[in-house]
Image (cartoon, rainbow, N blue to C red):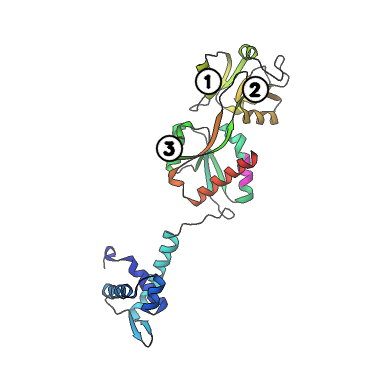
């Protein structure tokens, strides 16, 4: 018998006949008319070359061939219903899944501790892996499924094929050491222009504030240029340099270093921090749970 010639609906009919032992009751269970059910049973008999069900008294009793097929066909029908047609549920309390997140070092510092604390409560057996990569590579990792989410500022992901969810809006501030000799609680434009600056330019990432200054024609002395935001704290707290950074990073530096921050002397750009994911995983239960869990953490912080 060629499997391509088998109508799988007939297996459902067979399973109903085994269970109900009646054409009428099986038809009602499958929401079929009695003539349609009788026609399906006739097709089953032709398919297997056996009467399969014969009337004995008030019931249609299975033949030896039907009894031989019964367990196997029931297993096939149940497998199709549970493993193919039924979307698998995700239980965070018992899952041992590893979630991979694309995020720059600034996001690792500011967001990852909060995410880990949330997972420890709701999904204590899950694991987290982070990746830092250029913008084009982030898109590829989400498309391929090698990462579930990207978290941060990824303007290149604001395109067809990707979903996004806003987490927060981040302004820019100026970061200096607490004992800075000339800058107090407020920075003037003259102080900004006369100061020496430390600038972070991560490889392959958007330099939002630098682009803003270029468009405005604002020039300042850049004494040091580094690739990682987390190298900034010891540099600023041990010098008179000024660093202009996203506010959430400045808040982290204040908590962990001898520094303070103030507003920039000009109206600087804001950065919207989003979650991004590829449309392939929009309906995946584990993926949807993770997105919701992270978004809930940020709502609680707002």
Q: Could you give the CA–CA distance between mark 3 and mark 2, rounded to whole angstroms? A: 37 Å
Q: Which mark is residue 140?
A: 3
Residue 117 among those drawn in magenta: yes
Question: At which x and y percent is residue 234?
Answer: 66, 24
| Residue extent of the magenta highlight | 113-118
118 versus 231 height, above or below: below
Q: Residue extending furthest front?
A: 33
Which of the two discs, 3 and 1, labels the residue nearer the N terminus?
3
Residue 250 in the figure: left or right of residue 71: right
Q: Quadrant of residue 302?
A: top right
Q: Tell me the residue at 31%/72% (across/down).
A: 36
Which of the two discs, 3 and 2, labels the residue nearer the N terminus?
3
Residue 133 among those drawn in magenta: no
Residue, disc 2: 263
Question: At which x and y percent is residue 43?
Answer: 28, 73
SS at circle 2: strand
């Amino acid at each position: 018998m060629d499997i391509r010639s088998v109508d799988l609906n007939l297996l459902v009919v067979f399973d109903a006949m085994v269970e109900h032992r009646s054409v009428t009751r099986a038809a009602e269970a499958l929401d079929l008319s009695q003539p349609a059910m009788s026609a399906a049973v006739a097709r089953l008999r032709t398919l297997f070359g056996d009467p399969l069900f014969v009337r004995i008294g008030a019931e249609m009793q299975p033949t030896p061939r039907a009894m031989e097929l019964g367990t196997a066909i029931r297993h096939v029908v149940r497998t199709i219903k549970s493993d193919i047609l039924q979307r698998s549920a995700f239980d965070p309390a018992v899952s041992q899944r590893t979630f991979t997140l694309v995020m720059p070092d600034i996001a690792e510092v500011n967001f990852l501790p909060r995410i880990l604390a949330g997972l420890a409560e709701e999904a204590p057996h899950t694991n987290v892996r982070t990746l830092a990569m250029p913008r084009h590579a982030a898109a590829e990792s989400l498309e391929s499924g090698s990462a579930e989410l990207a978290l941060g500022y990824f303007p290149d992901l604001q395109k067809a094929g990707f979903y996004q969810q806003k987490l927060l809006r981040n302004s820019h501030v100026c970061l200096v050491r607490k004992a800075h000799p000339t800058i107090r609680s407020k920075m003037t434009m003259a102080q900004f222009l006369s100061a020496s600056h430390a600038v972070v330019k991560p490889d392959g990432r958007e330099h939002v504030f630098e682009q803003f200054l270029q468009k405005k024609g604002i020039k300042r002395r850049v004494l040091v240029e580094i690739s990682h935001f987390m190298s900034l704290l010891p540099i600023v707290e041990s010098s008179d340099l000024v660093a202009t950074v996203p506010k959430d990073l400045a808040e982290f530096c204040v908590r962990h270093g001898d520094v303070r921050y103030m507003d920039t002397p000009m109206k600087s750009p804001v950065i919207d921090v989003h979650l991004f994911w590829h449309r392939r995983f929009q309906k995946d239960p584990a993926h949807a749970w993770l997105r919701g869990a992270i978004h809930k953490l940020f709502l609680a912080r707002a």
